[in-house]
Amino acid sequence: MKRIEGLAWVLVAVALLGVVAPAFVQSDNVHSDLETVAYDRIALSLRTFWADQASPDGPSLPTSFRVDPNFPLGTAALFALPYGLGLDPVFGSRLLTLFSALLAALGLGLLVAAGAGRTAGVLAAAAVWGLPAFTRNAVVTGEAAPYTAALLGSAALLAWECKQPRARTARLILAGALLGGTVLFRLDAFALAPVWIVAVAVSLGISSAGWVAAACLPLFAGHALVSWHIYGSATAFARRAAQVTKQNAAFHDQPLLRLLQALADQLTLPGCMLALAAAVFALMAVVRTGLKHRSPLSFFWLVLLGSAGAYLAMIGTGAMQPRLHRYLVPLLVLFLAAALMFAWGAIGTSLRRFIVVALVAGFLCVGGREALRDARDLRLPSAVPELAAWIATEHSLSMVRVSGYHPEMVVLTGLSETVIQPLPRSSRGALDVEALLEQRKKPNDLVLVAFAEDPLSADLADAAGRLALQVLRSDQHVVVYR
């Protein structure tokens, strides 16, 4: 067994050095084309805590406070830390996300170790980096990693408490605080928190569930009060989020099929089969023999089955968009844990253990290769940061220069958002400057102009005249936040 555990630790090193580090180095701060830009988390933090200070002279304490009703407050607070500490906001935010993902991997390992042993836990901490969505959301700015870390940290603490003769109040409160903190990052925490509390009530008793719920309550109530203050309703945040999700859904989208496709894409078909088999056998065991009191496995299966039900309900009602894999990261991680624990088994020969290690190595190889391909495919064209740097030099009000979707440009200044469609052309195909200038709403606006050809060229027009600069290709338009 020591040899197998040594191989498990080797896989952890392979995951960190062969997948995580290259993905971080090769990545730009961009999600996939379907998902929200990673840079808007930085923009969110700046406009939340420095709303009235258009161009701070270096990092400073927050000068104002303005809640953005489209995001829970935790995201803004977390990604305001690098800027407030004098760090580069992009690199510092990515490091925060990576650190959160490492904590999430540790939490998963501890959760699996509670139910299946230490070696299985080490394998889980390695295998999780074979989930492309998990790895991608570990190397770009976003709330998926801290959200998942808080959920898994809470679950791991509670699972280990199931191994104790008597639950310790301090651990229950800490687990509840972590669970309550999830609502500061994602609104689906309102659906998952009851699952955790019910699992605690069944596994540890009503009094333990009461401590966990009491630790959750202040954060959940605080979020509801913020929603009430902004909208006049405690549930308006959630309704607004569901409305945005429905608006972003593709025409004729079938969300449940999308969910199955996401599971197959991320876990691979063998992983999906193992995870589904694990869930079915767990459900059969519950029906046949009931749940064992103070059992880490019983707690885990309750969390898994309850979370799967919560996600199905959210997706079926349109409150969650399965096309965006970052929303599914917690569910994917739990399914991966179920597949690994089922394959590992309570009793197994050395041959079985070696087979599981080989399966984890293969899964890590396949998923890691996909994550590295995402890192390469989502790199920004070289002209984008050059253009952003040029704008920052010419316009001193810029706070941070970033880029999101291809071909979106994001430049934060104190000005309004402007969308410029492909340039008007004259009869001879040249840029129609007069038509362009007529589109400008204000005489002193900076205008980013894009042609539809490839390579794309751009003209930057301001009160001082016209300046030409090569930029990036665009099929539709270029967006500038100003």
Image: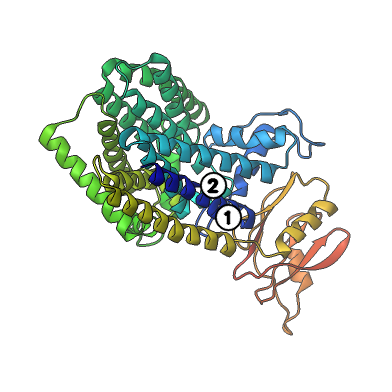
Whether 356 is drawn above or below 185: the answer is below
- For marks 2 and 1, give the one nearer the viewer: 1
Left or right of 34? Residue 202 is left
Foreground residue, 454 or 417? 454
Mark 2, residues whose alpha carbon is within 10 Å: few (<14), some, or many (≥20)? many
Left or right of 263? Residue 233 is right
Q: What quarter of the picture does the N terminus occupy?
A: top left
Whether 55 is drawn above or below 38: the answer is above
Q: Where does residue 122 sit, x and y in percent of width and height?
A: 42, 41
Work out which residue is located at the far left of the displayed protein and give it.
288
Q: N-terminal of the two: label 2 or label 1?
A: 1
Asked if the residue under mark 1 is in contact with the one under mark 2, i.e. CB atoms within 8 Å, the reply is yes
Q: Secondary structure at mark 1?
A: helix
Q: Where does residue 451 sit, x and y in percent of width and height?
A: 69, 72
The residue at which mark 2 appears reads as: 138
Work out which residue is located at the far right of the displayed protein and give it.
464
| Residue visible at 42% across and 49% down in the picture | 127
Q: Where does residue 239 sit, x and y in percent of width and height?
A: 41, 39
Q: Where does residue 457 sit, x and y in percent of width and height?
A: 74, 72
Q: Quadrant of residue 189?
A: top left
The residue at which mark 1 appears reads as: 23
Color encoding of the figure = rainbow
| Residue visible at 71% across and 61% down in the picture | 384
| Residue visible at 37% across and 56% down in the picture | 358
